[in-house]
Image: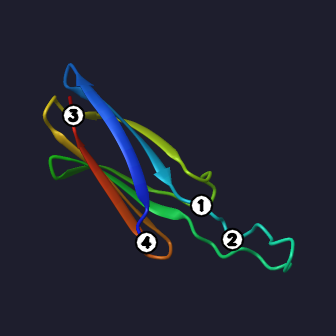
Amino acid sequence: MSIKIRMRGKSKGGIAEVKALIKHPMESGVRMNKKTGKPYPAKYIDMVEVMVNGTKVVDAQWSGAVSANPYVAVKVKANSGDEVALSVTDNTGEKGSSSITLK
């Protein structure tokens, strides 16, 4: 199962604002299951990359401290017609990616 990402963005004056909503539970591994008394297994996004026309412009490392279904907004140098892609990987190896062509 892959991580789902919804993106949108637009460019103005050579700067693009790209927004993304990532559907992911972001479980830190510390929270306890009330029925069993055992912790939920850790499952969180640990790598986020943003690429513009195939060139990496953002490389972020996250931890379990990020909330579930995180929202990301970044500004990058890009023009109308450029392709912006966002890819994520979680600590279990699950991956997701999405891309848009800027307006």
Please name whichever residue, 31 or 5, is drawn nearer the observer in this view of the structure. 5
Disc 4 to disc 1, how far (Cα)?
13 Å
Reading the chain from its start, which is encountered first: label 3 or label 2? 2
* Marking on residue 1: 4
Please name whichever residue, 79 or 77, is drawn nearer the observer in this view of the structure. 79
What kind of element bears circle 4?
Answer: loop
What kind of element bears circle 1?
Answer: loop
What kind of element bears circle 2?
Answer: loop
Mark 4 or mark 1, which is nearer to you? 4
Q: Residue at x 50, y 72 (%)?
A: 91
Circle 4 Cα neighbour tier, 10 Å, few/some/many (<14 / 14–19 / ≥20): few
Identity, as a three-letter code, of the amino acid under mark 4: Met
Is residue 37 placed above or below 84 in the rendered structure? below
Mark 1 sits on what residue? 25
Mark 3 sits on what residue? 102
Residue 103 image offset from top left, x and y in percent? 20, 28
